[in-house]
Amino acid sequence: MPAPSRPTVRSAITALAVTFAVALIPQAASAQAAGALAVSHKSPFNCGKTFYANNWTPTHNPSGSIDWQNYGSDAINGETVRATAAGTATFYNAGSTSYGRWVEIRHSDGTRTRYAHLATQVKSPGSSMTVSQGAVIGTVGSTGGSNAPHLHYEQRTSSGGMDTSPTVEGTTVSLGTKKALKSTNGCGGGGSPTNPNTPESVCGSGFTVIDSAALTGGRTYLLYNSGNKNNCVVTLKTTSLGTATSVSAFLQPKGESKATDSGKFEYYAGPVKRDAAGQCVVWGGSVGSSTYTSPSEHCG
């Protein structure tokens, strides 16, 4: 039999390549779908709190968004709002219309969540910050186009489109349904709340913990930034999280006045920052009646 001509060989190779590429499409699609499921969302509230998640009929604007509202004895007005998943949070204020005070968080897979009608925000409008799942971003209110306190919540795709059947706490809230969901956001392994903040997240980029001291109900930390020679002190609570109780943090470079942050806070006191290049420092803090004051140390 004569050898095949060059066009015939080329056609065979092309057909084989097409077959191979088609065979790969389902695998690529599966990998993409797996990536879309990588981010799971918890309730945007404190550990143990239960609220209704209302995914109203298509007349809700935008369709598929959730209105979180009162459930039983849990009243939502003024409630702490937490990130449902980790990402980069940007803070906005639309004024008296639309969302009012609101936050958008962009997650690692490109998807987004939005939290609207907030009474307060932890950052000023236009600011951005990296947040972990459970990080506090504001409190529930009724700003913007709202006629009663509630949290307007959206899950959006990476292109900005609405997910009309969002999943929270492993439960899908389909369009037109209403479900009572109990939050596990910020809960530790034993089901109790954990502090979503870290010393580094409070003090900011460039700071590293160089010392710490235990307190009853918390811990106080001393951090140092080798770039700008600043020290930073923060006291993190481990009890009564989400409830404002007495906490303090202070820092005093040798020969200078003491700088203190003291008051009733939900999660931490600080950051207290001072330039202490070449100086010894006295530092410490308190949670309730438990206090720590260091000797003059960490000189240089």
Image: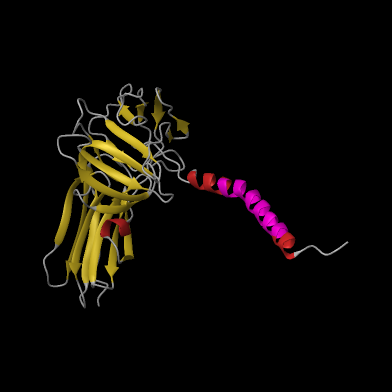
Vertical side of 97 occupied by 133: above or below? below
Query: Where residue 259 sits: x, y (%)?
Result: 14, 61
Depth check, front residue: 87 or 7: 7
Q: Is residue 26 visible?
A: yes
Query: Where residue 76 sits: x, y (%)?
Result: 27, 29
In the rendered image, residue 269 lying in the magenta stretch gets the answer no
Query: Where residue 115 sits: x, y (%)?
Result: 29, 38
Q: In which quarter of the image is the C terminus?
A: bottom left
Vertical side of 270 occupied by 139: above or below? above
Q: In which quarter of the image is the N terminus?
A: bottom right
Picture quadrant of residue 114: top left
Depth check, front residue: 269 or 1: 1
Query: Where residue 233 sits: x, y (%)?
Result: 24, 61
Q: Which residue is found at the position 26% from the left and 37% from the top?
A: 116
Count of numbered labels shown in the rendering? 0
Depth check, front residue: 195 or 238: 195
Depth check, front residue: 282 or 8: 8
In the image, which residues are magenta? 11-29
**Image coloring type:** secondary structure
In the rendered image, residue 28 lying in the magenta stretch gets the answer yes
Chief secondary structure of the magenta portion: helix
| 113 left or right, relative to 27 | left
Q: Which residue is found at the position 39% from the left and 34% from the top?
A: 183
Q: Is residue 288 visible?
A: no
Q: Which residue is found at the position 25% from the left and 72% from the top?
A: 297
Vertical side of 136 occupied by 68: above or below? above
